[in-house]
Image: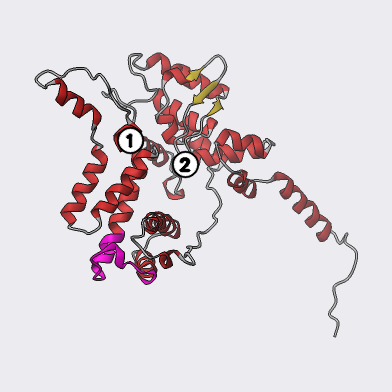
Amino acid sequence: MDITQATVGYVKHPAPVRGISPEATLICAKKPRNLLIEKCLERFEKENLFGQSHVNRYLKGQYRRGCRPSTIRGTFQTIIGFITYLAGRGRTYLEQVTRDDLCSFVEHEQDRGLKPNSVSTTLRSVYAFLGYLVEREVVHPDVLRKKMYVKVPDTLPRAIDPEDVKQLLAVIKKPRDWAMILILLRTGMRIGELLDTKVGDINLPEKRIEIFEAHKNRVGRVVYLSEDARRALRKWLKLRNPQIEVLFYGQGRQKALSYEAARITFCRYIEKAGLSHKGYTLHCLRHTFASELLNAGMRLECVQQLLGHSSIEMTRRYARLTDNTRKEEYFNAMASIESGGINGHYQCHH
């Protein structure tokens, strides 16, 4: 199936365009342009790299599958970096790629100082592209034998300390910023999900926000508003421009507030609260939400649904960070040990 039919559909009776004949209008309607892919390929041509036809078909395949523009853009950045590296090693065709090329590319990325998580993500993207080429008999299957894996540290989520949360909230004065940060803190929404939220997605009487498509895994869910978050949101709704569809927008703009603007706003308040040295980020508000719910005794399965995690193992990381039961059992056991209340003796047997 042609990409235009798969993504847009065949238009039988397009509306006529002034100055263009009906036949030409039909051709334009049947062949819409994907500007993102065209822009990527223009850069590919400027770099004078090989394999453009394969990259073009691979990106269009992602487009047909409904991948987000950010995913397509990230895939292209990885592929162009990989092919640029191959060209530096004297390769002139994708058919010449070997397993040694892939190994040395991973080492090259590590030598650049990239973190293990970034190298692992890059490697997965390259493997997906090579898998596509192997299926079409462009690359030898041996390239994919015994895949390499980069060990990624399993770090603890970074939550904001309760006292620091109080300091942060104390310096926020603007109603828009107060509502935005408090909603993130009380709902666990990802910042992208909140910035995509429309006024129509909010149900104040039932204290809920409907996320029709999650920003990361594209799965819809419902989150709930605490009483303080609802009061902050109600105040902002009275002040905002009712003609703008999105909930949070930039000053003098009709579009949604950008991620960078939200990040700068958060960092400004962190600095004002005297917490810059602690390295808190916007995503720490989501970690704080999960940690506080588990501390309050909420079941792990409920927290998973609220966070929108596809696997409960992702949510279980927070249980390692805050587990009151484990903490109480440890201190009870240590109290017994320190008081000499355990039986038995430790001795060395020669």
> Where the N terminus falls, by quadrant?
top left
Q: Is residue 174 visible?
A: no
Location of residue 39 in the rendering, given as x and y in whole percent from the top left corner: 22, 43
- Above or below, 208 against 4 in this view is above
Q: Nearer the viewer, residue 149 or 156?
A: 149
Does the magenta run of residues contain 333? Answer: no
Are there few (<14), some (14-19), or many (20+) residues within 10 Å of tag 1?
few
Residue most extreme to the left: 19
Residue 238: x percent and y percent?
41, 13
Image x and y of residue 52, in percent: 24, 53
Mark count: 2
- Other-residue count near label 2 (Cα within 10 Å), few / some / many at <14 / 14–19 / ≥20: some
Is the image coloured rainbow, by chain, by secondary structure, or in one colour?
Answer: secondary structure
The numbered mark at residue 283 is 2
Give the quadrant of the C terminus.
bottom right
Q: CA distance from mark 1 to mark 2?
A: 15 Å
Q: Magenta segment range?
A: 82-100
Residue 259, image quadrant: top left
Mostly what secondary structure, the magenta segment? helix
- The residue that mark 1 highlights is 261
Residue 325 is situated, as x and y percent measured from the top left of the image, at 74, 45
Magenta stretch holds residue 91: yes
Q: Secondary structure at mark 2?
A: loop
